[in-house]
Amino acid sequence: MIPPEPMAISFDRLPDTTVALGLLGKLLAGPSAQGPRRMNSPFALYGAGKLGLMALDFFRHAELAPAVVVDVNAATLGAESPWNRLSILTPAEVPEATKRDLPLVVSIATSRFADLAQSLKSQGWRDVIPFYDVTEAYRDRYPLGNGWFMGHLDASGRESIERVLANWYDDQSRAHHLQFMAWHRLRQDWCFESAPVDQDHRYFVPEVVSVLSERENFVDAGAHRGEIARAFRHGLADQFESILMLEPDPANAAVIEAELSEMPPDLKNRHRLLKVALSDQAGHLPFFPGLGYASQLTGMGEGNAEAVTLDDLAVAPSFVKLHLEGHEWEALRGGLATLRRHRPILAMTAYHNEAGLWPLPAWLLDNLTSYRHYFRLHSWCGTGAVIYCVPEERHEASPRDNPARATPWVRS
């Protein structure tokens, strides 16, 4: 059975609280989207970029393999690429019978899915599926949680979401929160023209950059391979106090170590790498390594990682970034004393599980008072959601000649 056409709905104005609550009612009134998609027959994969590489690893763990891979840059992928064992074609090379007979799994989250699906269907593809809808059907084999579906809300859950919508600092946050929910409940693209998805400034939105100074102590939890720490360092032109990176995956940590080894001593000495995970308890916890961005603490773990709490680290952060594949709330609970004592800026991902709907933001509202709370989307298909919390006093103390304000903070 071919699913219904993907839908995009555009809004020309940002929603204030009253409008946002009305739109929430409409969002919840409609039937929810169809559930996860299992691949019980041959299928094709569209997209061989960063998300495509994650898809390739997922298929290996799920014991699946695309019959063909389609990418506009197929001709430029070298013989040494991970794709060389698969049949890879440009869109123009795909036979019409393949488009008619095979479902097409789309591993792209950098553009609006409804537009991309419409374009692919105009080329002859009959069944176009978001990649994360497939991963959700194989959660027993692979721990990636980005494809969850928003289920039924009881009265308490709805009241909690209404409270969160009313307490975001700005209407752009309400717009992005509604867009986030519309995807996870309806698999629809709700687009607010005055609140575009910002794909260039994840973790470093203007509301954060405008209050940064050269005295920052940055904690990067879930450091991956050092990309965010590098963007922070470059954005401040190396004018900062310290960077602490936490990365439990051995392969990822090795990349960070190699980069640190090449730094001048005065810069290197302001960095510290701990090969640990951040949680609400210390000890050795089940960990699934080797998944690149998706390595994480999970009961499916094939090994263990040393876990610590932020409070245990006895640090004095001024800026904390958390990208922990759904473990952000645990990390916050394990660092509450530190957060209350030092009142850092926070930037944390909120899209790996349903906690991003309201439990996580509600906890932040309750525990981080006199903060400005923002919700921003940095990619499509229900991903790239980041909650930012900026202490009110940072706005009062922000220097007029702040060098960060004039710096283009674009992630490398």
Image (cartoon, helix red, strand yellow):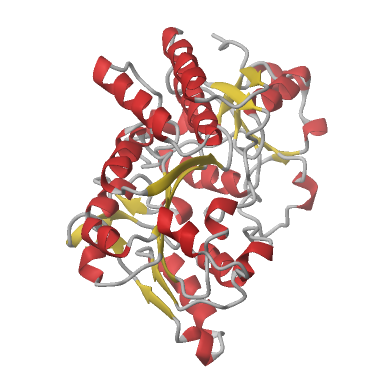
* Observer-nearest of 195 and 125: 195
Q: Which part of the image, by quadrant, shows the C terminus?
A: bottom right
* Lateral position of residue 268 relative to residue 86, left or right: left
* Lateral position of residue 94 relative to residue 352, left or right: right
Q: Is residue 226 above or below residue 272?
A: above
* Residue at the (42%, 19%) spot, across then down: 35
* Residue at the (72%, 40%) spot, across then down: 71
* Observer-nearest of 66 and 177: 177
* Observer-nearest of 340 and 66: 340
- On the image, the x and y values in percent for residue 172 come to 56, 35
Work out whether residue 33 can be spotted: no
Looking at the image, how many numbered discs can be counted on the residues? 0
User: Which residue is at the far right?
Assistant: 92
- On the image, the x and y values in percent for residue 270 come to 45, 82
- On the image, the x and y values in percent for residue 141 come to 35, 39
- On the image, the x and y values in percent for residue 400 come to 60, 67
User: Which residue is at the far bottom?
Assistant: 265
* Residue at the (42%, 13%) spot, across then down: 28
* Residue at the (31%, 65%) spot, across then down: 342
* Observer-nearest of 218 and 51: 218
Image quarter of residue 113 = top right
Work out whether residue 300 can be spotted: yes
Q: Is residue 216 above or below residue 338?
A: below
Q: Is residue 163 above or below residue 235?
A: above
Q: Which part of the image, by quadrant, shows the N terminus?
A: top right
